[in-house]
Amino acid sequence: MQRIALLLAMLASAPLALAAYDEPLSAAQAFRPTLSAYDANTLVISFQIPEGYYLYRDRLSIIDTEGFQLTSYQIGGTKVIDDPVAGREEVLDAGSRVVVRGMSTDQASRVRLRLKMQGCLKDQLCYPAEVRTLTTR
C-alpha cells in the first residue's frame, strides 16, 4: 500500500518537475548579442540564441551609434519559418550575424550602438520589443 501511495505521489509531482525545465528564458538570457570591431570601418554583431528561440529580421534595427558613423548594415544567416502568429517570417538564430559598415569617428574610444529587436520562443511566447546598448570589446 505504501508503494502505491509513493508511486502515485511521484506521478503526481512529475508535471511540476517537468514544468521547471520548460520555464522560458528571460529575453536577456535568450537573446545575447555581442558587438566586435572587425576593422576601423566594419563592426559585427553576433548572437547567442538557444535552440527554439529566434529574433524577427524585420524587427531588428540599429537606432543609434556612438563613436561610429553608420553607412549600412547587412543581416546574414537568416532563415524563413512559419510563425504561428505572423505567418512566414525571416528570422535570426544562433548562426546569424549583422555586418555593420561605416567609419570610426574616434580612434581612442569604444564604439557603442543601440540595437532594437524583438524575438520569440517557438510556439510558446513572444517577447516585447526592446533596445539594447552594445559596446565593442
Image: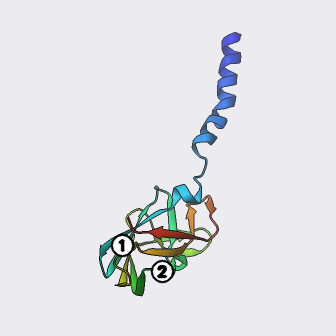
Which of these two is toward me, 38 or 75? 38
Which of these two is toward me, 112 or 30? 112
Q: What's the amino acid at mark 2? A: Thr
Residue at 51% from the left image edge and 79% from the top image edge: 61
Structural crowding at the residue carrying mark 2, measured as other residues with C-alpha within 10 Å and reported as few (<14), some (14–19) or many (≥20):
some
Residue at 59% from the left image edge and 55% from the top image edge: 26
Q: Secondary structure at mark 1?
A: strand
Indicate the quadrant where residue 129 lies.
bottom right
Q: Secondary structure at mark 2?
A: strand
Residue at 60% from the left image edge and 68% from the top image edge: 84
Would residue 13 be found to the left or right of residue 37 on screen? right
Which of these two is toward me, 33 or 88? 33
Q: Residue 44 has which mark?
A: 1
5 over 50 or under it: above or below: above
State the image coordinates of residue 65 (x, y, percent, origin top left).
48, 80
State the image coordinates of residue 99 (x, y, percent, origin top left).
36, 77
Would residue 9 be found to the left or right of residue 57 on screen? right
Please state, as top left, top right, bottom left or bottom right, where the C terminus lies in the image. Answer: bottom left
Indicate the quadrant where residue 4 lies.
top right
State the image coordinates of residue 7 (x, y, percent, origin top left).
65, 20
Question: What residue would you read off at disc 2?
Answer: 65
